[in-house]
Image (cartoon, rainbow, N blue to C red):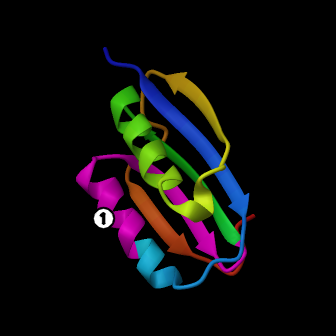
Amino acid sequence: MEKIHVILFYKFIELESLEALQRKHLRFLNENELKGRILIANEGINGSVSGSKKQVEKFKEFLTSDEKFKDIVFKEEVGLEHPFRRINVLIRNEIV
């Protein structure tokens, strides 16, 4: 059985065009069959994403390829099953 990798991340940074950012992330996550929950707000991003090691590494590359998130720090855990049932990218007033 393949292990599931879970990453947690957040960054306080001023963001604009939240709807475009939401669509971009949702498209990438769906295309790569990742699961999790990401909150975006004008004050930053906060998320947890799960998938195979390869899927998670691809997401990390995707996120850090954006200049705003190039220095984001990831906390990673490994488990036997997805902690999430689907993917959600939500716009909120706060990320905490």
Q: Secondary structure at mark 1?
A: helix
x then y, percent, for residue 88: 44, 63
Task: Residue at 37%, 65% (x, y): give it.
Answer: 26
Number of numbered discs on residues: 1
Crowding at dot 1, Cα within 10 Å, few <14 / some 14-19 / many 20+, comes out as few
x then y, percent, for residue 68: 61, 64
Q: Is residue 9 magenta?
A: no
What's the magenta region?
23-43
Residue labelled with disc 1:
27
Q: Is residue 42 magenta?
A: yes
> On the picture, is 69 further left or further right than 33?
right
The N terminus sits in image quarter: top left
> On the picture, is 90 further left or further right than 85?
right
Q: Amino acid at mark 1?
A: Arg
Task: Residue at 67%, 43% (x, y): give it.
Answer: 73
State whether residue 84 appears in this view. no
Nearest the eye: 21 or 64: 64
Q: Quadrant of residue 76?
A: top right
x then y, percent, for residue 45: 63, 64
Q: Quadrant of residue 50?
A: top left
Task: Residue at 53%, 23% (x, y): give it.
Answer: 78
Above-or-below relation of 89 to 5 = below
